[in-house]
């Protein structure tokens, strides 16, 4: 369980840092012509960590009841991810202030979910 937990914390740290960087730095600074390229590169760069984090979370949840909450948080954080990636192409072609506001709200929700999950895992790792 220790190796799985460490793997999960590392993947969660990488993905959480990406979520914050994308929300705070990348999206506000990107010009319209780079959105598609950013989306493709982000998907390729982080899909391995997302899959590893999901698989290790499932194994941890099966092994320990304490790890069910992080699995639920991870699954909840996937909802804004799917919505953001699904509508990011629409957002790229129609940059409208109202669209950007809800796009940003989903990003902030994703940041909060990922951070709470990361903090839970990190504190659990320190305690055990």
Image (cartoon, grey):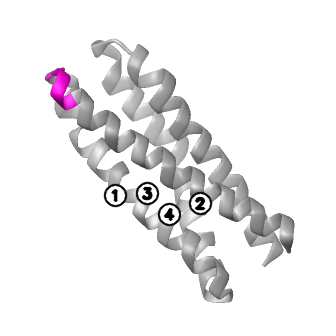
Residue 91 placement (x, y as % from top left) = 21, 29
Residue 59 placement (x, y as % from top left) = 62, 80
Residue at point 72%, 53% (across, down)? 10
- Are discs 4 and 2 less than 8 Å apart at CB? yes
Name the residue beneath numbered marker 2: 117
Spatial CA span between label 2 and label 3:
9 Å
Name the residue beneath numbered marker 4: 74
Name the residue beneath numbered marker 3: 77
The first of marks 1 and 4 along the sequence is 4
**SS for callout 3:** helix
Spatial CA span between label 3 and label 1:
5 Å
Name the residue beneath numbered marker 1: 79
- Are discs 3 and 4 less than 8 Å apart at CB? yes
Residue at point 64%, 45% (across, down)? 14
Query: Which picture quadrant has residue 56?
Result: bottom right
Quadrant of the rendering where the C terminus is positioned: bottom right
């Amino acid at each position: 369980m220790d190796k799985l937990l460490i793997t999960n914390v590392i993947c969660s740290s990488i993905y959480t840092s990406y979520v914050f960087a994308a929300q705070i730095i990348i999206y506000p600074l990107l010009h319209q012509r780079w959105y598609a390229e950013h989306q493709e590169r982000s998907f390729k760069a982080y899909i391995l960590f997302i899959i590893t984090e999901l698989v290790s979370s499932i194994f941890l949840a099966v092994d320990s009841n304490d790890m069910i909450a992080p699995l639920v948080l991870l699954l909840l954080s996937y909802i804004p991810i799917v919505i953001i990636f699904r509508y990011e192409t629409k957002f790229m072609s129609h940059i409208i202030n109202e669209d950007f506001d809800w796009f940003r709200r989903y990003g902030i929700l994703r940041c909060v979910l990922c951070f709470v999950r990361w903090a839970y895992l990190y504190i659990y790792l320190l305690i055990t």
